[in-house]
Amino acid sequence: MIFYFTGTGNSLFAAKTLAHEGEEVISMIEAVRSKAFHYTLKDNEPLGFVFPVYFYTVSDPVLEFVSNLTVENAGFVYAVIPCGASIGAAGGFLKSELKKRGLELQRVDALVVPDGALIFYDIDSPEKMGKRLETATKELASIKQAIDRREGNSIKGSPVLGKMGLAAYHACMSTKAFHADEKCVGCGTCASICPSGAISMVDGRPAWTKSKCLKCCGCLGRCPVSAIQYGKKTASRGRYVNPVLK
Ligand SMILES: Cc1cc2nc3c(=O)[nH]c(=O)nc-3n(C[C@H](O)[C@H](O)[C@H](O)COP(=O)(O)O)c2cc1C
């Protein structure tokens, strides 16, 4: 059983790649919305968590899900954490949160992926993004084999640093700078995919009706006409979404 959260698709891609035939891949956002917090594993079934690192830590939807989670018959527990460069304290922080739920995290892998966090910086060239995805795909194959062998590893990152990262993240969640430019066709994709439920369609155009969101960049990457902007910088930047979401 694999639980995932994704903004631009890398984590869903990773979760689907890691899953064996018939294995359940469950959205933590959907689970929180429907209050589905209780699960039972088959004998010897591994339990995986796949989600992007934000501010070198674990983000709110994952923490909210984990803090309510109960799992019966759990054995090997692992996490794969997609990142642009480094997962910082995310592994150790997740381990301490899972421990509170009686779950022993045994393996954490950072997975460097094509990074579409374009509210912060421009994305790489398509060639570089393609190479990153190719490398990540190979890396996932070897992680999957290690999981199949139930191979643990050393999990780094202090929960205190994880909480500090979270505080920094919380200070940067404002939706103020988001807007749709003249290219917007009013399709409503952004409103339907926003994991924060922060976007509503008002008079046929997106409006950010919540003051905070996860800043996952999914709306920027998944808008079919690249009409979503964040401040002035994103108009000249590229867009990225993992092919799994296309
Ligand atoms: C709000 C935000 C914060 C991020 N913080 C980090 C970070 O601290 N370290 C890092 O290496 N990558 C960071 N990234 C990059 C993401 O981890 C990377 O884009 C990831 O693949 C996104 O996964 P997804 O496609 O499943 O949403 C950040 C991205 C966003 C949107």
Image (cartoon, grey):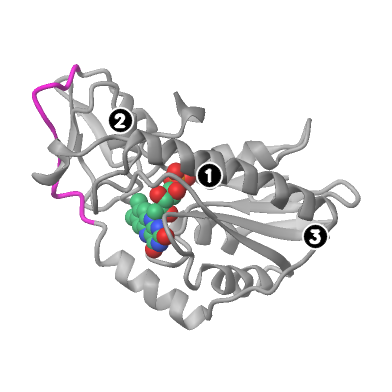
- Residues 199 and 85: in front is 85
Q: Which residue is mark 2?
A: 190
Q: Is residue 164 magenta?
A: no
Q: Tag 3, which secondary structure?
A: loop
Q: CA distance from mark 2 to mark 1?
A: 19 Å
Which residue type carries mark 2?
Cys
Q: In this rendering, is residue 143 above or below 161? A: above
Image quadrant of residue 172?
Answer: bottom left
- Residues 15 and 212: in front is 15
Image quadrant in which the C terminus is located:
top left
Q: Is residue 31 left or right of residue 70?
A: left
Mark 2, residues whose alpha carbon is within 10 Å: few (<14), some, or many (≥20)? Answer: many
Which residue type carries mark 3?
Phe
Q: Tag 1, which secondary structure?
A: helix
Q: Please tell me the numbered disc located at residue 76.
A: 3
Q: CA distance from mark 3 to mark 1?
A: 20 Å
Can see residue 27?
no
The region drawn magenta spans 174-185
- Residues 45 and 150: in front is 150
Callout in the foreground (2, 3): 3
For the stretch drawn in magenta, the main secondary structure is loop
Q: Are marks 2 and 3 in contact (CB under 8 Å)?
A: no
| Percent of width and height locating residue 200 | 25, 32
